[in-house]
Amino acid sequence: MTVLVTGGAGYIGSHTVLALLDAGEPVVVVDNLSTGSPDALPRHVPLLVQDIGDEAMMAGIIRSYGVDVIIHLAGSVVVQDSVRDPLAYYRNNTVAAHGLLSAAVRCKVKHFVFSSTAAVYGNPAQLPVPETAATDPQSPYGASKLIVERMLQDVAAAHSMRYVILRYFNVAGADPDGRAGLSAANATHLIKIAVELATGQRSQMDIFGTDYPTPDGTCIRDFVHVSDLAQVHRIAVSHLARGGRSAILNCGYGRGYSVLEVLACVRKLSRKDFTIRHAERRPGDIVAMVADVRRIRSELGWVPQHDDLNAMIADALAWENKLVALRNLRKDSAASA
């Protein structure tokens, strides 16, 4: 069974590829490298630098590699960018998915795993939020993903395709063995920014909104370790291969941490202090988001291995220190050349 991973050279994608390889699954990656890097992948993994929205091209790739299942991770993911440039998000996330799904239907691919987001819920009426909650995205990012969810469900009904839709909560951390991590420049992830501060790569950071109706006034998020999330994709592939039914599943741990709690943990583990500025709320931000995780644990039998904020931050710090050391080594080599 060959697995096609779109966006496989990115943060979550590279960890998912590692999880699949560790399980002995053949993998092929398609990525336009807008945010991903070939260095994120083992050298033996086929990497095709292509636009996933090109139906004819994708159909050729699916046939050439004998693809049985698609894990679709490619897309744009920054909420605030989507507010500023919504059409780019509908193009990159929704229109591109149309091309990919069209190729999958043409080639009779029967299994599809889609990377969605908790942003489809908007500001939920209850916490933890179940998959049955109303969807009311507050940003074009969330809306672009929700449209793809509906498109996938309609395609599956018409063409006997089975799917797993994974609604990610906040992804953090890095591979505990140091094989992969978040390397993209100008990343917007809270923990990534905080560990860059702790390692001296930033001079300060902004906290957007300190007057939310939460215990300390800052937003609350459910953080999930990227390696646990990668395993969810692997398990979802096995679930579909065994004839498992289609499902929409939350990917989180079922507990939330505020922005200030996360920053306090980074300070403690790094033993570094750093400057924080208070800034205005940003359009599209959600007050609090915590997953109801009963369905994913019962449907997939998923048992997280890294359900600990300290572990997530420690792995992120270790990866960031590795990146700093590599950059310093390159500088020294260039200076001595």
Image (cartoon, rainbow, N blue to C red):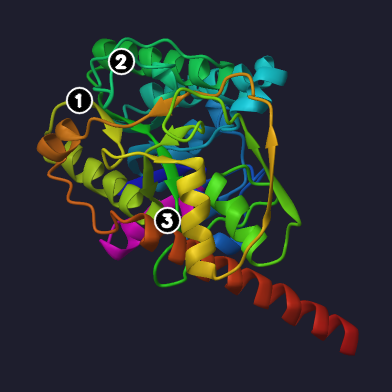
**Which of the numbered marks, if any, corresponds to residue 86?**
none
Q: Earlier in the sequence, mark 3 or mark 1?
A: 3
Residue at 67% across / 59% down in the picture? 274
Q: Earlier in the sequence, mark 2 or mark 3?
A: 3
Label 3 belongs to which residue?
15
Which amino acid is tagged 3?
His
Which amino acid is tagged 2?
Gln
Label 2 belongs to which residue?
153
Residue nearer the viewer, 216 or 184: 216
Residue at 51% across / 24% down in the picture? 212
x, y (%) of residue 172? 45, 50
Label 1 belongs to which residue?
246
Q: CA distance from mark 3 to mark 1?
A: 23 Å
Q: Magenta segment: does it hold 33?
A: no
Q: CA distance from mark 1 to mark 2?
A: 9 Å
Residue at 26% across / 27% down in the picture? 128
Q: Secondary structure at mark 2?
A: helix
| Residue interval drawn in magenta | 13-29
Which amino acid is tagged 1?
Ser
x, y (%) of residue 178? 46, 71
